[in-house]
Image: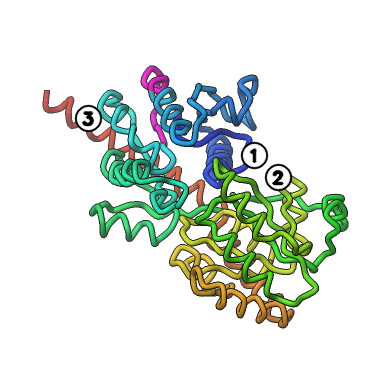
Amino acid sequence: MKIAFIGQKGIPTRTGGIERYVENLSIGLTKLNHEVFVYTRPNYTPKRIKKHQGVHLISMPSIHTKHLDTISHVFFATLHALFQNYDIIHYQNVGPALLSFIPRLLKFRTKIITTFHCLDRNHQKWGPFARFFLHLGEWAACKFPHKTITVSKTLRDYCYKKYHTKAEYIPNGATPFPKTPKTPEVLKKFNLEKGRYLLVVSRLVRHKGIHHLIRAFRSLKVNLKLVIVGSGAFTDDYVEKIKKLASGDNRIIFTGRKQGPDLVAFYQNCYFYVHPSESEGMSLSLLEAMSFSKAVLVSDIPENLEVAADAGLAFENKNCVDLQKKLKILIKQPDLVARLGDLAAEKVKKEYNWEKIITQTDLVYEKEKLNKQRFLKTSLQNT
């Protein structure tokens, strides 16, 4: 089949959970002998890159502002897709799904799929106008496509309860990373020692709850460091706020965005991982940390508990006092940390591996293709 992905910034992944999802899925689908096309933005993937591990890359322009970058790129990508012979057009998340009606109406022989990654309208970086359209995008993601996929059971249930849509649950997966040297240079650069720091990997946006973690950590009298890996996303004011909140405590380290071996090194060598997000879809960084046999401390939102309930510790969402209490429990109990880390790795291996996810997605495509063939056959018989 010819399969197109629309809505992501691009691949190879530099940052972003959706981008990592699309990269792993698209590469896996090419190995199943599908011809896969990923639409990219020139501000993310250089236009000169035309192919990545067998996946065709199509660069389309965008208006690179906070509110127009995604929707403008999706519009241009959708127009281009109308003139291609795709079997499947797969939109990523609710914002891009707003325009999925165009190929649904005009590409009669093409099946439209949407993956519902998260409730974007809950993210605090958006104002009322953007939230209105993201709310509309939820409806579009459930009503326009031939099939809606959700990355969590929580989102699947939400789609049915709110929009009466029977979505297909196919989770995110933990990216397989290569091993790094025992003493990576990046640890030396930030004066870090193995097992002597806590880790969070996240975009620096308010709904990820980094400010709660900084407040809780600052009040702890421990000889450990807190490493915050990530960068802002049109959120310079928030980045400035949390850096000011952390000022004066040299145990708190901001590394900026990291990828590849450096990111692996941070995961491999941390004591345990903290994920304090106020809202989520299904966090890839959380899955990745678990895949490295790391104990995880998460906010108790349903999407986090779905992943880590049996293999981690939870604190009350937005409650810095409870977060501090749970931090103390893990810091003082290395045996518990090790045990939870083993459980985490086993759960990821069993439930969130990419081979299984790619196969499940391919089955959705094949089922929709079969439905199309049956429909066309019936139509011919009736003429």
In percent of the image, x 74 and y 79: which residue is there?
Answer: 334
State the separation of the CA atoms marked 3 and 1: 44 Å
Q: Looking at the image, is mark 3 or mark 1 nearer the viewer?
A: 1
State the separation of the CA atoms marked 1 and 2: 7 Å
Q: Which residue carries the number 2 mark?
A: 259
Q: Would residue 37 be visible to someone looking at this image?
A: no
Left-right relation of 184 to 166: right
Location of residue 45 in the rendering, given as x and y in whole percent from the top left corner: 61, 29
Location of residue 103 in the rendering, given as x and y in whole percent from the top left corner: 32, 27
In percent of the image, x 55 and y 34: which residue is there?
Answer: 30
Please give the range of residues in magenta.
Answer: 79-90
157 is within the stretch colored magenta: no
Residues at marks 1 and 2 touching, judged by CB atoms closer than 8 Å: yes
Where disc 3 sits, the SS reads helix
Q: Which residue carries the number 3 mark?
A: 377
Where disc 2 sits, the SS reads loop
The part of the image, by quadrant, that contains residue 191 is bottom right
* Circle 3 crowding by C-alpha within 10 Å: few under 14, some 14–19, many from 20: few
* Circle 1 crowding by C-alpha within 10 Å: few under 14, some 14–19, many from 20: some
Left-right relation of 132 to 177: left
State the separation of the CA atoms marked 3 and 2: 49 Å
In percent of the image, x 68 and y 45: which residue is there?
Answer: 257
Residues at marks 3 and 1 touching, judged by CB atoms closer than 8 Å: no
In percent of the image, x 76 and y 66: which residue is there?
Answer: 225
Where disc 1 sits, the SS reads loop
82 is within the stretch colored magenta: yes
Instruction: Give, as a three-letter code, the residue at label 1.
Output: Arg
- For marks 3 and 2, the one nearer the N-term is 2
- In the image, residue 370 sits, relative to residue 76, either above or below, namely below
Residues at marks 3 and 2 touching, judged by CB atoms closer than 8 Å: no
